[in-house]
Image (cartoon, rainbow, N blue to C red):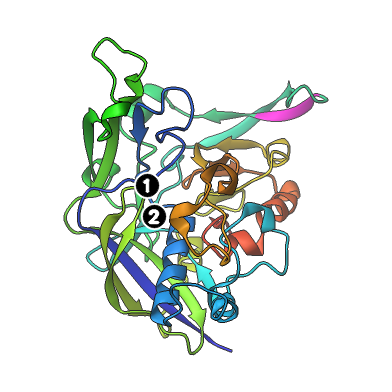
Amino acid sequence: MNNKTYLVTLTPLDWYFFGGENTFGEGDGARYYAKSNKYPQETTLLGMVRFKLLKQYNLLPLNENNRAEANKLIGQASFNYHHKNNAGANFGTIQFVSPVFIGKDQKLFCKAPFHYGQKVEFKERSKTVFYSRESVFSEIPVIEGFRSKDYFNQAGYDQWLDLETGMLVEKMNEENIFSKRTRIGITKKEENRGDENGGKNKNGFFKMDTFRLKPGFSFAFYLSLSEGISFPEQSEVFLGAERSLFKMEVVDVSERDYDYKQKLNSSPIAKQEEIYFVSDAFIPEKIFELCRFAWLDTVPFKNITTTTKHTNYAALNKDTEKSKRFNLVRRGSVIFCTEKNKKNILKLIDNPYLQSFGYNQYVTIQ
């Protein structure tokens, strides 16, 4: 059976807030200062797709009479990392959700490898210890002419590739893609407000960072559905903790060449001994014992885990329904490996469940 593939673009119509670790009620000081992520997590996109399909096929509100049909359409449960090895875990007619990209002028862009433009060589070996385990030998990378001050001042970590050509896009960075706004205020509930001297209700004050995309930019991702399943061509959707409004546009690309991994594989950024992450990734600690070097950053991750038995999402107990905290390897990160260990490293990264829904997507010459 052939799938139908769509390119879905989401353009924010106002400021948005995508929750991460630094949200109200999460950790020390976070009740006062909440910081939005710049990008929606793939679990957010998957949740939006599931909701739109239920609405498209008149299966809302969920109840005992339509639950079996809903399960067949979108699967019984939302994304759950602990289902990654469960062959029975699926999302019904949703076959694939790609990582989220940035779109502009009918082109798509992804984060370039963090080491782009840097020459990394390995010349020595050093004895190191991983979490008090037995000592192991790791190679010391030599980065010719690298100065961390220049790297960060010149935004060497913030470069972008054209997804069609795999080539670097000149003068494109997050500063000209995103706008940030900081809101400072007090809670609407009078009993929760604090006093100016920091009284017992000081958590009533808040500070919040929100974002919006600059004109012309949008978020974009590929979506594959089972044959015969349609998806609305255009509508408005609410996303994020603040229920921000986005314009959603959908184009059928089933007959087009949309294999972005194949395109990136043939670009100058791919090398035999490097694994470059196009998406955020769940990777086990064991990889750091096998690789030569890792040039990476991390992003905290949590998500709400629900099933179609929940008919009132507003009544969810987030303390029990929220997943534990993960540190994902951020898109743009690179793992350097030897040909000998490459196969074992890829076995630890590859996972059909994660890779079908936007995570653990990488590029390397096979």
Q: Quadrant of the C terminus?
A: bottom right
- Inter-mark Cα distance, 2 to 1: 19 Å
Q: Return the residue found at the far top.
A: 197
**Would you say residue 177 is visible in this rendering?**
no
> In what element is the residue under mark 2?
strand
Rendered position, 289 above or below 194: below
> How many numbered tags mark residues here?
2
Rendered position, 213 above or below 117: below
Camera-side residue of 79 and 178: 79
Residue 108 within the magenta-colored segment of the rendering: no
Marks 2 and 1, the one that precedes in the sequence: 1
Q: Position of residue 91 (x, y in %)?
A: 58, 71
Write the residue at 22% across / 65% down. Answer: 105
Camera-side residue of 290 and 286: 286
**Would you say residue 149 is visible in this rendering?**
yes
Dot 1: few (<14), some (14–19), or many (≥20) neighbours within 10 Å? many
Residue 137 within the magenta-colored segment of the rendering: yes
> In what element is the residue under mark 1?
loop
Magenta stretch: give its range.
Answer: 135-139
Which numbered circle lies on residue 120? Answer: none
Q: Return the residue found at the far right.
A: 134
Q: Return the residue found at the far left.
A: 215
Q: Main secondary structure of the magenta part?
A: strand
Q: To which quarter of the image does residue 34 belong?
A: top left
Dot 2: few (<14), some (14–19), or many (≥20) neighbours within 10 Å? many
Q: Position of residue 154 (x, y in %)?
A: 30, 32
Residue named by callout 1: 18
Residue named by callout 2: 110
Q: Amino acid at mark 1?
A: Phe
Write the residue at 40% across / 76% down. Answer: 55
Q: Position of residue 59 (x, y in %)?
A: 46, 78
The nearer-to-camera label among 2 and 1 is 1
